[in-house]
Each structure stands twice: as C-alpha cells, then as structure tokens.
Image (tube, rainbow, N blue to C red):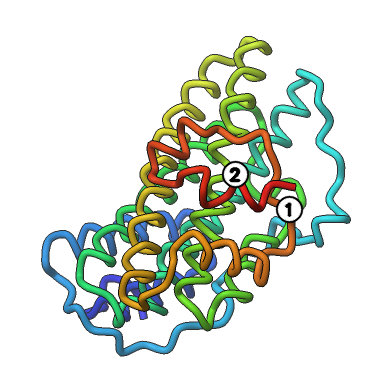
Amino acid sequence: MDVTEASSLGEACVAVLRCSDPRAKVMMARKAARDWRLGRLAHRFDAAVPDRPGRPGTPELLPPNRMPKRGKGGSQRARTAMLHALAHIEFVAIDLAFDMVARFGADFPRDFADDWLRVGADEAMHHALLARRLHELGSHYGALPAHDGLWEAAIETAHDVAARLAIVPLVLEARALDITPETIVRFRRFGDERTASMLQRIVDDEIRHVAAGTKWFLWSMNRAGQNPQESYQNLVRRHFRGTVKPPFNDSARSQAGLTRDFYGPLAG
C-alpha cells in the first residue's frame, strides 16, 4: 500500500517502512507526517509492522568492522565519505521514527505520534539535504558501502518501547550531539561552509529529537512506577552493544532534558 492509499496512521507508517527507494521514502515520510497533522489519518494501528524496512540495492551494507576507513584529511574524497555515512544514518533514522509510531503508538497518547512523525519528517529532510550535497560534490547516496548497526539496535529493542527509547534517541542520537559540533568545525576548517551550515541545522534538530526521547522515556517510567535514571542505565547495559563514552556535549544533552545523572554512571 502507498501512503496515498492509507486511511490509518498504522497503514501510512508501514507504507513508509516498506518503501525501498530513497527519494520515494523521503516524499512518503513527509506526506505521512503532513496527512497526520491535517487530520487525514485515523489514530488506528491495523497494519503488520515489518521486521526490516525496505532498502535500495545500494549502498552495500557491511558489518561495522568491515567498513573502509574514511580518513581524516580534508580531501574531497574524505569529505564525501563522511557525508555519505551521515546520509545513510539519516536514511535509517526515517525508518526508526516511523517504526517507533507503527510498533508502539497504540500504547501511547496521540501526541506520541505527533512527536515521532515530526522527527521522521525532519530525518527525511536531513537525508535529502545530504544526498543533494553529495550530488553537488560529484557523488550520490549508494556510491559507498554503509553499515547496518542502527537497524540492529531497532531489532534488539523491538519488544520493548522503553528499551527502544533508551537506546535509539537517548544513546545513538545523543551521541550525534557529542560528535557533530567537531565535524562542523572540521568542515569549516576545510573551507566548506555550505556543508558546515547544513550540519548545524541538523544538530539543532537533533536536540529536539533527543528531547522527544527524554519526554517519552520519562512518561513510560512514570507509567511503570520505575526510577528513570536506574532503568535507563539497566536498559543500556542490557541492550547497547557499544560503549557510552566521553567527551559528552553536556550543554546540548541538558537542553534535551538528558542530564548527566542518566549517562554519567555509564561512561567508559
């Protein structure tokens, strides 16, 4: 089913997830978010959520330990590789947002869908911006390999919304708040102000995304009568395969409501 045929929120989200063409997925994501905002979709979850979303034939997906090194120089090749990696992260992030709604939305108030569809539309816009910049630099999304670690986190947490919220927005997206400012500095050092400005726009949006994660994690903990900080730390230890490591962008994290008492005890 295409988004244009969907009458319910569940159907629209699953249509986005099943779409494999990057440009079409971007357009479908933005249309689904717009249709929900305009009241065209019923708050109903009546479509089976796929275990894996649609993916294009390229990029080739590799385990993280088989990914080629991007290098740290300021060459156009190194910059293109970095932008390609970011474009892939944003592409997968579209599906993470729509999967959040399709898989867990029935158990939450309507504004859960409001927040995550807005996140999904942002991620679609981010991917489109990065894909366009790659084209301007003589490349395209799919030209290089990419890793599938983000969706592995989705599979790991498919059974538990608290785990999904803890790992995806409050570990993975929060990590982007830590590292993207330095990436912006690097692009400015290379004289690429266009890309630096684009990345600044993206990181500003990511603060709101982490804030949505914090909001709904706290809501879930309040509903379950659990301690948010202790539960967060337990969920991360159980479901996150990497290390929560400094340096942390405490200021940006704090703006999103993710204070050091959540992640400080996990720092390794």
- Residue 232 in the image: above or below residue 262: below
Local SS, label 1? loop
**In the shown orientation, is residue 60 left or right of residue 264?**
right
Local SS, label 2? helix
Residue at (65% x, 70% y) in the render: 239
Say which mark, if any, is on residue 225: none
**CA distance for labels 1 and 2:** 11 Å
Residue at (50% x, 45% y) in the render: 127
Residue 100 lies in quadrant: bottom left
Q: Earlier in the sequence, mark 1 or mark 2?
A: 2
Q: Position of residue 215 (x, y in %)?
A: 33, 57
Residue at (36% x, 60% y) in the render: 29
- Residue 214 in the image: above or below residue 260: below
Q: Amino acid at mark 2?
A: Arg
- Residue 118 in the image: above or below residue 127: below
Q: Nearer the viewer, residue 197 or 141?
A: 197
Q: Position of residue 179 (x, y in %)?
A: 62, 34
Say which mark, if any, is on residue 243: 1
Q: Nearer the viewer, residue 47 or 113?
A: 113
The residue labelled by disc 2 is 175
One can see residue 135 in this view: no
The crowding category of the residue bearing disc 2, from other C-alpha atoms within 10 Å (few below 14, some 14 to 19, many at least 20), is many
The crowding category of the residue bearing disc 1, from other C-alpha atoms within 10 Å (few below 14, some 14 to 19, many at least 20), is few
Q: Amino acid at mark 1?
A: Thr
Q: Which of the two marks, 1 or 2, is nearer to us in this view? A: 1
